[in-house]
Image (tube, rainbow, N blue to C red):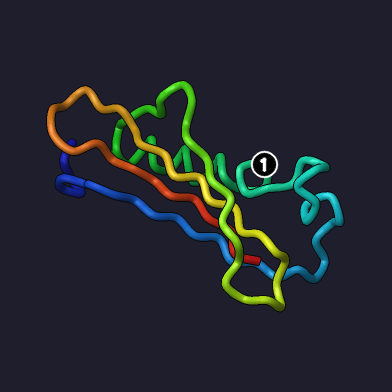
Amino acid sequence: SGMLGDLVAVSTVWNSSQAGRPAWQKDRTRGGGVLLDLGIHHIDLTRYLTQSELPKYPRSEIRPAAMTSRPPWQDAWPMAFSTPAPGPRPAVSIRRCD
């Protein structure tokens, strides 16, 4: 509806504590990661707000965490959405910094 104006980017960040998290959420080889944990909620909200859809295969990256006291990785899923309207495509970057 254009209520938010012309969005060109959306960034979602989830910060959480390591305390109380199950071990599998901290182990990427066991299925942990930002998309499994909370990412779908960020994607759904972005789809709703932008009235856009994700392409079939979003690009993913894993970037090293900036702080050495944290796990040696940070999930990052940059995604560009398709939209029926001409102009900039909304993009979302979902990150979790534990």
The x and y percentages for residue 85 are: 16, 26
Q: Disc 1 designates what residue?
A: 36
Residue 93 % position (x, y)? 43, 49
- x and y, in percent, of residue 65 in the image: 60, 66
Q: Nearer the viewer, residue 68 or 97?
A: 68
Q: Quadrant of the C terminus?
A: bottom right
Residue at 78 percent across and 56 percent down: it is 26
Lateral position of residue 86 relative to residue 89, left or right: left
Give the left or right position of residue 2, taking residue 31 as reference: left
Q: Which residue shows up at 77% across the image and 40% down it?
A: 31
Mark 1: few/some/many CA within 10 Å (<14, 14-19, 20+): few
In the rendered view, tell whether residue 97 sits above or below residue 57.
below
Q: Position of residue 52 (x, y in %)?
A: 32, 30
Between 71 and 89, the one lying in front of the other is 71
Location of the N terminus by quadrant is top left
Task: Identify the residue at horizontal 48%, vertical 35% (top origin).
Answer: 59
Rendered residue at 74%/46% (across/down): 32
Please tell me whether mark 1 sits on a helix, a strand or a loop: helix
Say what amino acid the circle numbered 1 marks.
Leu
